[in-house]
Amino acid sequence: MPRPSPLESTTADTIDSLLRERLREDTIPGLSLAITDSDGIRYARGYGSRDLASNDPATPDTVYGIGSVSKSFASLSILQLVDQGALSLEDPVADHLAVDVPEAVTLHHLLSHTSGYPSLATSEALIARQMTVGEAGVPLGTWEDFLAHFEGARDEIAGDPGDHWMYCNSGYTLAGAVVEAVSGNSYVEYVTENVLEPLEMGRSTYDREVFEAFDDRMTPYHKTDDGLEETPVPIRELSAAAGGLLAPVTDMASYLRLHLGGGAANGNRLLEAETLERAYGAYADTPSGPYGYGWRTRTVADETLVGHGGSIAVSTAYAGFSREHDVGIALLANTAPGYGLAELGQGVFAALVGEDPQKLPFFARKKRFEELSGEYESYRAIKEAEVEPEGGILRLRVGGPIGDGSWTPLIPADLEAGRFYAVTAAGNRQPVRFERAGDDLSLYIDRWRLHKK
């Protein structure tokens, strides 16, 4: 087998700089990256710390929770069973499970999030419970509890199967149960024997004790108003198929080589290429691109990138690949930075195809928001203001001798030109603009001109 070629030093430097900047600006304790082609890993490294108290470094072998990247393992398992003739994607779910679900809902609908069921928040409830940050008060200790919760939501169905795309973790939990019903093994046993072991993913697990036995593992951190708080790792026993796998980027690189290789990797063929190709179909339009079975297709720097992100609130993940460029990217972090790691994955991909990652919309927006954020004051500092980013907008708080000091959202109208608007209590748009003249950055709102300190 040919040896993979290493990255050019300039490309590696661009990627390192990009990721270190985000660790610094977005308070990410540790991050691990692996870049692979179909022959093997081309670049792998860790950034920051997997544990802050000991300052143990993040490495390519650090084990993290990969969250919803796990869904593609569930869809792969279903497709393997399709390949074997044990089931069909058009099978009604009710044919395989004793569960009260409309007859029209098929495995295809579960895997593409088009069943009509909205999110039933089971994952959120279980993750919050294990993190000890909140309690929903919903019984979810057993499979029977899950079924009762799911079946009780029959009136929540938002439309006929195929009508809407609504991300539903519970649908993937059911898909995992179908794997169990058809294979005769537990879902975790099936994935371990039919995916993890053939791909030599020896540091990947769904089990808490196995995870805690690894010396090189993440310490999970939850972001609070007071900073980073160490929390227990949420283990998704009931929803392993939806988001329960823990893995390092080195193992994820092996998994991505399976997809680059059309269903074969490490000398093993796990399923036929034609069957695997169904995972990447465009079955539903989403704001971030067409959705398949645990994979989403995006256009990045005018190129096609197939991938998926994941989060368990204290660990975030991204895995993506491009067959056209024979490259796979795995990114894992030990906190949730406030955005999906898919954004960083796209930045890495842009660098790999020779484009400037900073020109991608996410990074350009971040840079502009960081420029405009800060403290402002009027003439002789009678009036003061704060501007800070909040998701995809800015927010503004104006203080002084008179004023309630409440936060006001600023909606971008023309980000590059520095033009925003706020919505008044009467529902009118209040123009807000930022203007730079030399070293002065001014904020104009209503009658006020304020200068950035």
Image (cartoon, rainbow, N blue to C red):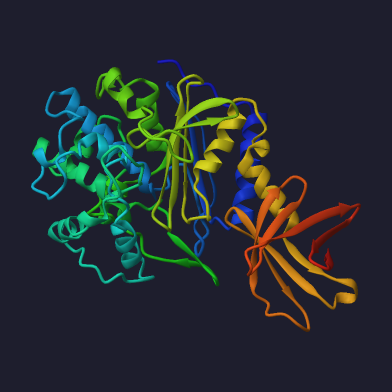
Quarter of the figure with residue 138: bottom left
Q: Left of 56 or right of it: where is 374? A: right
Camera-side residue of 413 and 226? 413
Q: Residue furthest bottom?
A: 401
Camera-side residue of 281 and 343? 281
Quarter of the figure with residue 26: bottom right
From this view, report whether residue 365 is shown above or below residue 407.
Answer: above
Camera-side residue of 36 and 378? 378
Quarter of the figure with residue 453: bottom right
From this view, report whether residue 304 is shown above or below residue 346.
Answer: above
Residue 405 in the image, given as x and y percentages of width and height: 68, 77
Q: Left of 212 or right of it: where is 354? A: right
The quadrant in which the N terminus is found is top left
Residue 430 in the image, given as x and y percentages of width and height: 72, 61
Residue 315 in the image, given as x and y percentages of width and height: 43, 54
Q: Residue furthest top?
A: 2
| Residue 196 visible in image | no
From this view, report whether residue 167 is shown above or below residue 162.
Answer: below
| Residue 425 visible in image | yes
**Going 30% across and 33% down the picture, which residue do you hit?**
200
Q: Left of 146 or right of it: where is 167? A: right
- Total numbered badges shown on the rendered structure: 0
Residue 71 in the image, given as x and y percentages of width and height: 31, 41
